[in-house]
Amino acid sequence: MTVGERDAVRVGRDVASVAGGPAGPVPVWWAVPGAVLSGLALLVAFAPYGWWPLALVGVALLAAVAHRRRLPAAAGLGFLTGVVFFAPLLAWTNLHTGYLPWVLLSVFQAGYVAVLAVASAWVSPVVDRLRWGWPVVTGVLWVGQEALRGRVPFGGFPWGRLAFGQDDSPVLRLAAVGGAPLVTFTVAVLGGLLVWLGWRRWPAGRSAWRSVAAVAVAVVAVAGVGLLVPVGVRGGGDRVTVAIVQGNVPRLGLDFNAQRQAVLTNHVEATLRLAARVDGGTQQRPDLVVWPENSSDIDPLRDAGAGARISQAADAVGAPILVGAVLAGDQPGQVRNAGILWRPGSGADLGQVYTKRHPVPFAEYVPMRRLARMVSAQVDRVRADFVAGTEPGVLATGPAVVGDVICFEVAYDALVRDTVVGGAQLLVVQTNNATFDVAEARQQLAMVRLRAVEHGRAALMASTVGVSGFVTPDGRVLGATGFNTEAVVVRQMQLGDGRTVATRVGVWPEVALTVSACAVLVAAAVLRRRAGRVR
């Protein structure tokens, strides 16, 4: 027998039995329901449900049904998990645009879970040879999948990252060390521990209970590591009083843009009422007022009436207003989604304007418009393409330097980090949820909580319709508003000037974990070639 043949026999023997566990993949009659349950468990870990421990179960079930599976079958099971997970998670995308965009987005995102399941099946020989490495392998594969999904195509769509469902979990604090990738990695490792626990034939008697207890202790210990991570404001001490104005819209839906005069009026009038309370002595004067994205869809730099109304509000409240506005672009047919600082007495500060760097494809601009129109005429609702900004949203308001990101940008690691590296003392997310629902708003607020912990900065989310609120640097939400209602919330916020470990290391934890995932895939290829099992 040659060396290669001996290696093949050894790999085959390893694959045939894992500590007395199943000799092959789990039966189809178990795998299909397991894939469905995996998707459901992942779903309910996220807002509005918030049962974060079930993310571990979802990860474990997907790893179990994919293990030792033929690659096409693994892809099918992973796709099933992805559809069950993403279709309800992203149901808010079909509220006002019809079913097609929702279906296409859900199916496309489910494809990444299918790729993850194929990768999990592919690395089965590695896991079978190094059983103790199953949790770590599971962790790096999840990070690699999310890294790809968050970048490809058109800049990616990171919604539904494991880390974004852990806003009430002790592992959230790990974001201060390695950002969202480290949180995802930890959740997936815990799920890997669960599948390692289940993929065994335990001996009868007390020894089985001791083994189960040992794994349970390991899960709790890994999850509890986050509690040891210090979080909070880094190097700050000064406080500023900030007001969020949630002016609401006359009607939810895509036609909020047709109501733009009413939306602007709502935010002006709410600010004037705030000013009256300040003048009456019942409310402390804010140092900064934040209006949400699309609070002025009339370009206030070109429309004198809109500019005058904003100036009226700023002068009355006696504080600068960060206005979410749609501004004309440099070329005909182009517009910019921007945050612009409006100062009392002087009006628009053209030196403090942030233009959204990551417009949403097929919503704020249409790539390959002619081809996209063949799929759906809905793309023509986007009449003018939003152009992307090039500079981070670092705005010097006077009372504080704020790091501004707009709407979905909060899901992208680099866009938020760039503001902190640029000197932001306070994180601001301007958003418009008028075309979505409360579930989407709460999912977005969970991302704000992670960013606050990640960078040791107080943060806030200002929405046209809700949910708006303040977030402390340790991830607690204060002053959250209701949905589809007018509200003004005022709080003192502590400024931060230092940098967390996560801010310092940036993308490198994700790079290291993704490279590790690639190394595992290569190792599996070597083992499969030796065993003659490449499929």
Image (cartoon, rainbow, N blue to C red):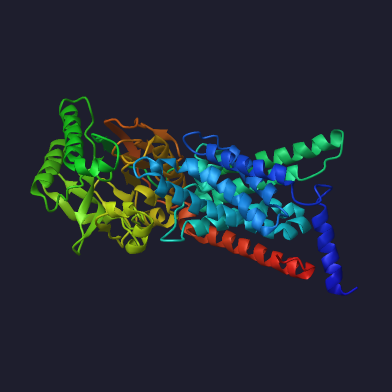
At 65% from the left edge and 41% from the top edge, which residue is drawn?
33
Of the 4 image quadrants, the one containing the N terminus is bottom right
Q: Name the quadrant of the C terminus.
A: bottom right
Look at the picture and state if 51 lies above or below 495: above
- Residue at the spot 71% in from the left edge and 38% down from the top edge: 216
In the rendering, at what x and y percent does residue 108 appear?
Answer: 49, 54
Residue 18, position as x, y percentages in the image: 80, 51
Q: Give the quadrant of residue 377.
A: bottom left
Q: Is 108 drawn above or below residue 473 in the view shown?
A: below
Closer to the camera in the image, 188 or 321: 188
Q: Is residue 517 left or right of residue 304?
A: right
| Residue extending furthest toward the front | 374
Examine the rendered structure and indicate whether residue 385 appears above or below residue 87.
Answer: below
Residue at figure coordinates x 21%, y 49% from the top left: 341
Residue at 81% across / 62% down in the picture? 11
Residue 170 point in image, percent of width and height: 56, 39
Residue 327 point in image, percent of width and height: 20, 54
Q: Judge whether residue 390 can be spotted in this image.
A: yes
Horizontal placement of 393 versus 278: left or right? right
In the image as oriented, which residue stretches furthest toward the right? 1
